[in-house]
Amino acid sequence: MRDVLLSLVVAAALASVGTRWATPDLDQNGDVDVADLLVLITAWGGCPDVCCLGDIDRDQVVGMTDLLELITWWNIYNPRTYPWCR
């Protein structure tokens, strides 16, 4: 129950700032897990595109804030309540 409430609170907070944030489910399989972590590590560093894979916070750098966001959603991601980049 705590995880569901946490995901709803975070999703509401992110929705209030618009769609700047992308999904932490980088492989789009419905879960935030090791596969997403590997995608993020592979994309680590500068990002020339505003909407590149791994740049969850859309600051054009795949880095620590993206890693922390991915960890925050580890095993509690719900694709219906989290904004998408597209």
Image (tube, grey):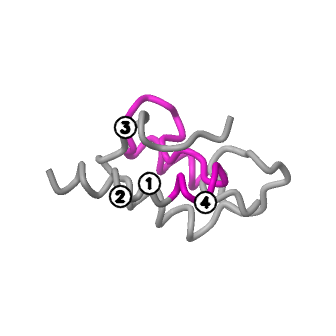
**Residue lying farthest to the left in this orientation:** 1
Query: Which mark is on residue 12?
Result: 1
Direction from residue 4 to residue 66 in the image, left or right:
right
Give the Cα distance between marks 3 and 4. Answer: 23 Å
**Residue lying farthest to the right in this orientation:** 48
Given this view, does label 3 or label 4 mark the residue nearer the observer?
Answer: 4
Q: Residues within 10 Å of mark 3 (few under 14, many from 20)?
A: some
Secondary structure category for the residue under label 3: loop
The residue sitting at 34% across, 51% down in the picture is: 8
Direction from residue 46 to residue 82 in the image, left or right:
left
Give the Cα distance between marks 2 and 1. Answer: 5 Å
Pointer 2 with pointer 1, Cβ within 8 A: yes
Q: Position of residue 35 (x, y in %)?
A: 44, 41
Extent of the magenta region: 14-42
In this orientation, which residue lies closer to the viewer: 15 or 66?
Answer: 15
Q: Which residue is mark 2?
A: 9
Tell me which label, 3 or 4, sits earlier in the chain. 4
